[in-house]
Amino acid sequence: MKIIGTPIKPLAATLCAAAIALLSSCSEPPQIERGKFPLPKGIETAECEPGQYGGVFVLAAAQEPKTFNPLMSTDAYSSQAISLMLSPLVTYDPIKEEVVPALAESWTISDGGKTYTFKLREGVRFSDGREITADDVVFTFDAIFEPQLDESGNPKLDKTTKRPLLKYPSRYAGQYTIGGEPIKYKKIGKYIVEFKTKKVYAPFLNDIGFIEILPKHKLQKAVDDGSLQQAWSTQTAINSPSEIVSSGPFMLFSYKPGERLVMQPNPHYWRADKKGNRLPYLDFLIYKFVADANTSTILFATGQCDAAEVGANDYAWVSRYAETYGFKIYERGPDSSISFVWFNQNPGKNEKGVPYIKPYKFKWFSNKKFRHAVMSAIDRDGLIKSVWFSRAQKLNSIISPANKKWHNPKTKKYVYSPENSRRLFLEAGFKYDSSGRLSDSSGNPVEFEFIVADGSQNSTVMATTFVENMKAVGIDVRLKFLDFGTIISKIDNTFDYEAAMMGFTGGGDPSGGKAIYRSDGFLHVWNPRQKSPATEWEKRIDEIMDRQEIEMNPEARKRLIFEMQSIFSEELPLLYLVTPMSYSGISGEWRNVRIPPLGSIIWNIDELYKSDGQE
Amino acid sequence: MTRFIARRLLSLIPLMIGISLMVFLLMYLAPGDFLSEARNSKDISPEIVKQEEIRLGLDKPWYVQYGRWLNGVSPIKTSFLLPEGMREGKPPVYFGAPDFGYSWSYKIPVTELIGQRLMPTLWLALASTLLTYAIAVPLGVLAAVKRDSFFDRTAAFLSYAALSIPYFFLALLAVLFAATTGLFPTGGQVSIMHDFMSVPQQFADYARHLVLPTVVLSLGGIASMMRVMRGNFLDYSKAEFVTTARAKGLSENAVMFKHVLRNAINPIVTSFGFAFAGLLSGALLVENVMNYPGLGQLIYAAIVKQDQYVVMAGVIMGCAMLVVGQLVADILLAATDPRIRLDNEKIPYSKLAAFFAAVILIVVFATFVSEKFPDFFEAIKTGATWIIFFAVAVLCVLLVAGLAWAGIFFCKNLLGPTLKNIRGAAALAALGAMYIAALFAPVIAPYEPTRQCLDKSFHPPTGLFFKDGALYAKVYENVDPSVAKYKPVEGKGIKVRFFAPVEGNDYKIFGLIPFNVKLFSADSDQPDARIFLLGSDSTGRDIFSRLLYGARISLSIGFIGIAITMVIGFIVGGLAGYFGGTFDFISMRFVEFLMAVPGLYLLLAMRSALAPHFDSAQMYLMIVIILSFFGWASTARVIRGMSLSLAGSQYVQAAKSMGESPVKIILKHFLPNVLSYLIVGATLSIPGYILGEAALSFLGLGIQEPSASWGLMLAQAQNDTKVLMLGFWWLLSPGVAIFATVLAFNMLGDILRDVADPKKEK
């Protein structure tokens, strides 16, 4: 090895020499015993090409899971780890782009779309060997809707809504309250569960089917004694990983915070290949925790982990290492998130009676022409060229083009043209003075403060470019970087800001964006939580969002979503920026890799196998 | 001895209460809280957020929150402070294990979390301390023995250089080295397959991951300790007992190693504890850049995420280590040096009691007011802003006077000898050139620092050539926009004009005289013709211009910073030395408090608390103030010692008895005596400010875009991986600029010390 030759300091050199001597016998992971348990009756046979067992799959993650309890999980990292360990009733196949069976073998829809009946796979077990039955499904929903009791044992009611207060509030409770009432569920047989909703709810399967089913035999006690929120915490994972039982492809092997999370195959997983070998093929799945996304990209590029999302920013250099380290990078099309600039259009006053926005500025910000003019002055083409080396697209709609199913390609487009922008300002009654500064009809110079969250290099570049672009059309913008918390409190609580920049993650069903689109939504950032729609077009959006929820005809629903996007692009409450291309890389050793149009490249990690066995 | 140790450990208690209260208030004043992110998440309902608020106790006023925390930490607890529902069955006062609370983001007890992260940091600190001693001591001795040889000079220069490289820049280079060569891991404490290794392999794995962070962290320590070792060795080799030994006919080796070395190494060995503790602060930056999962990384992340109890426990941890390290140093010193006694210090119990009573009174009063008037803290915030501005205004007057006086003194007494020294002259010339360049940045910089050219991002430095007696700049073409690869176009060039007025480039020199002449500019009609002397950045801004404008910040921040610390340090130290008594006692306790605070951690907390109330222009001022706030303590201590001895001198006694006012005595008799110390100390501490600003800006907590500062410009190279990976090396030029400036200041300070040292003159 080369290390000895480098002039390292004596102590380090001694340590190194010792290290090399010891490492010369390379370490190998322990063998995983396979085929210990017979396949159950309800096993699913995967359509993939049969592979061979073995191999360690390494992933780098910039953040750690915060809990392994699906009811408590509120972030993507926890959810991702949980989804590898616990299976839902049904799941989404990103290649077929449809809902496919998971723990439920099949389902039927009756009663005009208000009753769903699921049939579970027979004989499928949790990783500790206990069978998964309808009782576990019922238990999962019971846990969600478990009421808070007062001293005399009656459910406590919320003072305003008069609905029972939940013992364990989670994001699911709201999701499963349809038409103002919690969904009804009951056990029909050992393997059959029935769900009923008060009214027709189009995205039912996506919502209800995707919750992970909890093991009753493990968590019943925690539900009863009130400790469900603390159950299956990171602490459990550290001290007794086997306590967290699995129904998915993997189960926990070990977790060391700040270091790594190791998973091993669940010997009772419900999928097998055509040869009757139980999936998954790989022996160990390791998440290595790193400080930031940059580090994980470096790890992937230098062959130290097996798969990674590669940002449009990094593609240029990562691809140079593809041959050396034997990996492939796939272009995945535009990113599903959206980024935008907006002006505060909140007409309200604070408790001292001072308007959030000075009235003359409110006049500008609420003027559609003003927003159009600003939009025309943003040099998005230049940004794409300079920052992303042309690996990005201009964003024209509130739904990213990545979401092919719902994105409307025919919304109004805005072209960079400072001349056009100046003309629009003049048309809207603004004036230019001799030095080229813009002012409104009453002589107020056009200037505003622009708040941006600090941290990301890309948002910094977009923000500074925006400032320069505005300078070019005679507007003075004061850029202010604040931490995320402050920004949230400003746009959500105190409303004392003028313009801001932010992004939302996207993808999935448009119902998920309700809080942004609807005028009473709390993410309707330019003027959130309106009592009644402030403008005609916001009223129309609200109608559309109500309508699409009960529209069962997919084509008609699509037309509604398209109309919504057209309105947003015309009214322009959000000034869209760019959406970078996304890339995913995976080591060339792995077989059965199938790239879906959207979502994770290792969505079928249970089917992946290493081409020529172990190294 | 036992009494001394017990007293020192007991003094930790008020220190920790003070520091934890300070950190708690800072976290409280910082806008937003741990739940801010959850509030804006698409799939978390407001009800959950509200319940979490209650669970975390965020709905209670700050003093209740702090009281609960303190009650948890204290081994003697009272049930009155427990949340309702937990009080039953508990006696009013009881004993319990210290509980540092719960990490909100990791959802495990803080003690556990710290426990996991403490060992890596301790290993790192231990390894670098050992490495430092192992290298610095022999090298220092060698340099002293071979005094003024080629080796000595090279070692001296290298140690200046090592002291002048910012930690984070070095760490950045180390990561790059690891990533490109693959010899060392790019981060972490263990490798991915660690779980599957045998015990000796695991040990080797730990060691391999320690190498790079250890080297990065030790370099500065090695350099400074080597200098100290060399100095000590030289001092003792002139001592009388050495002459005696030589006269006795002892061999030179025996003299050197038996007599000189043993004495010279003493203070260095005893400073072990101190060096060890000092490394903890440095570890914060190194751990973050190099992704080493230690305490520093944990605390930085916790500050960013507002994971309050983790921050508090971490800061207390760092502070305890600092105090214990100092304690170890003191004990070692007493053990090896019989001249030092530890027990002869008397404690003024009554003063101590009065001091704490006053502090408690203030806290209680603040609590009362904040309960009666909920706007109290808002008022404090605005009040603090005004007070700061007022203080700055008063200070400004003092500063200008102080700087002028120091300048005159410098020119009169120190300039001549310094210029006679080649290195001194070189350092002065380099600094002079830099200051002039920064002052005339609008003339010298060809473009505005914010001026973009989106067509030419990551443009390499423009090549120049001569043709027909005129200077031409090469024209480049972007041959591969997918990786920003530029090639010069053969035979094409733009003529470079000198001292020509440039249309649309009006600016005002010193903010007064309108001007539009540029030192050099491209003679072309095209608006996009550019001369990038040092290349361009991600939006096509000229690095050379940004470097010049950034120099204004980096170069002035040190001056303003030291001016503030020196003035405050002199006033407080001088008064304490002159008056003694209660003022001395209180001010010195405060100074000790400031010196015991783990600076960088608190700096971060302070910055995030204050930042939202300032514009990016004011941020500059704020950084100076924060940095000086911690800087003046050590100056004050030294000045106090000096004035204490001066106060006893006959001419001061005479002046006193003649009825001179204290102000006059301090200005007329103390100041001239300590001025050369102040100037030397100032010169040597300027680099601290430059590096401090760079580190803050590098972490994204200092100067903000679109303004330019050297640290901020370097951050781009770290945050945007492609910069290093695609070889846009010119973006590292701010690192070189920091290095050169700091090096010049260090060299100048060293020479000034020699010049001002009266012992040297003989």
Image (tube, coloured by chain):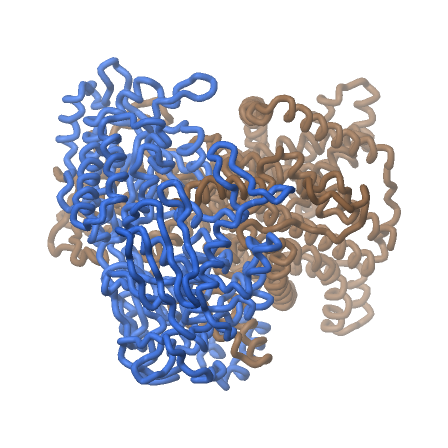
The image shows residue A430 at horizontal and vertical percentages of: 20, 20
Is residue B590 toward the left or the right of residue A99 in the image?
right
Above-or-below relation of A471 to B430? above
When asked about the image quadrant of residue A287, the answer is bottom left
Q: Relative to residue A551, is residue A358 depicted above or below?
A: above
Q: Residue at x 75, y 69 (%)?
A: B255
Quadrant in the rendering for residue A610: bottom left
Counting labels gives 0
State left or right for residue B196 relative to residue B760. left
Residue B295 placement: quadrant = bottom right
Query: Which image quarter is the N terminus of chain B in?
Result: bottom right
Write down which chain is painted brown: B
Residue A452 position within the rendered picture, expressed as x and y whole percent measured from the top left: 37, 38
Front residue of B676/B216: it is B216
- Residue B60: where, in percent of width, then height? 61, 35
Chain given the colour blue? A
Q: Is residue A32 above or below residue A580?
A: below
Q: Is residue B251 above or below residue B755?
A: below
* Residue B300: % across, % down: 53, 50
**Quick check: can you spot residue B421?**
no
| Residue visible at 44% across and 29% down in the picture | A494
Q: Is residue A606 visible?
A: yes
Please give the name of the residue rendered at 47% of the width and 36% of the height, measured from the top-left corner. B556
Q: Residue furthest top?
A: A442
Judge by depth and name the residue closer to the eye, A469 or A27. A27
* Left or right: A603 in relation to B551: left
Of residue A392 and residue B123, the one placed in the foreground of this image is A392
Q: As rendered, which of B473 and A455 lies closer to the eye?
A: A455
